[in-house]
Amino acid sequence: MSTRESTRTRLLDAADELLFAAGATNAPVDRILERAGVSPATLYRAYGSKEALVAATLDRRHEAWLEVWDAAVARAGSDRDRLLAVFDALDDFRRRRTGARWCAFLGTAAGYVDPPPVLAAAVRQETEALRSRLRRLAEPLVGDQAPVVADALVLVLSGQLAVRLRPGMTRTSARSARAIAAMVVDHPDRLGA
């Protein structure tokens, strides 16, 4: 027996709201089921495990993030602004109803010493997409230095997301992260690669 799409969506919505938007990354499955209004059997029929539900929720969140990032890139007027648009996208994404205090992927990775394969794969996919897109956007600006610049920008982005957990630093962290990223883009030779 298959699970209705509306039921699958309720499960995804509940997991997203509790785990990522509300920041309860270790919420028990019972809270997710209660929020979704479904039975444990429905969850396991639809996804097979809590971890598979979380991975599906991460996949959906990743798609939404990419749409927000694409819109920020589309608004940018230069190659440099297109590369740095990832910081605008972070702010835009955070302002959404389903925005979060910090990164759902970092939160998931931090929640496990040895993540289950389905979750490790979801985090790896997001990381590779981030690096790949940043590398592609950096190429017109820094040529063969693009992989090094992309990795440095992943580090700046990750730090900016982590600083959001510190009270009172959200506003300054966004401006500072963008300024640091601009220095990386303007001086890739200083990265020591």
Image: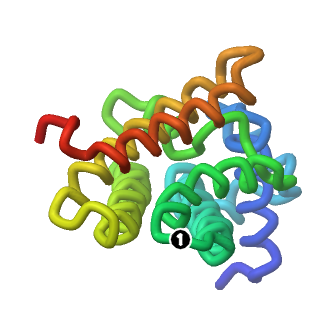
Identify the residue at the far top of this view.
Answer: 167
Say few, some or many: other residues with alpha carbon within 10 Å of mark 1 (under 14 / 14 to 19 / 20 or more): few
Circle 1: element type: loop
How many numbered discs sit on the rendered protein? Answer: 1
Relative image position of residue 82 (x, y in whole percent): 53, 67
**Quarter of the figure with residue 85:** bottom right
Q: Quadrant of the N terminus?
A: bottom right
Q: Residue at x 64, y 36 (%)?
A: 174
13 is higher (above) or lower (below) than 189: below
Q: Is residue 126 left or right of residue 69?
A: left
112 is higher (above) or lower (below) than 169: below
Relative image position of residue 185 (x, y in whole percent): 37, 49
Q: Which one is in front, 22 or 70?
A: 70
Answer whether residue 44 is visible to the viewer in this image. Answer: no
Query: How is the protein colored in the picture?
Result: rainbow
Q: Quadrant of the C terminus?
A: top left
Q: Is residue 63 left or right of residue 171?
A: left
**Quarter of the figure with residue 11:** bottom right
Relative image position of residue 118 (x, y in whole percent): 39, 56
Q: Which one is in front, 164 or 104?
A: 164
Q: Which one is in front, 124 or 166?
A: 166
Q: Residue at x 76, y 16 (%)?
A: 168
Answer whether residue 193 is visible to the viewer in this image. Answer: yes
147 is higher (above) or lower (below) than 107: below
Q: Which residue is mark 1?
A: 78
Q: Residue at x 58, y 30 (%)?
A: 176
Mark 1 belongs to which amino acid?
Ser
Q: Is residue 79 left or right of residue 1?
A: left
Q: Which one is in front, 16 or 52?
A: 16
Q: Residue at x 65, y 84 (%)?
A: 2
Identify the residue at the far left of this view.
Answer: 193
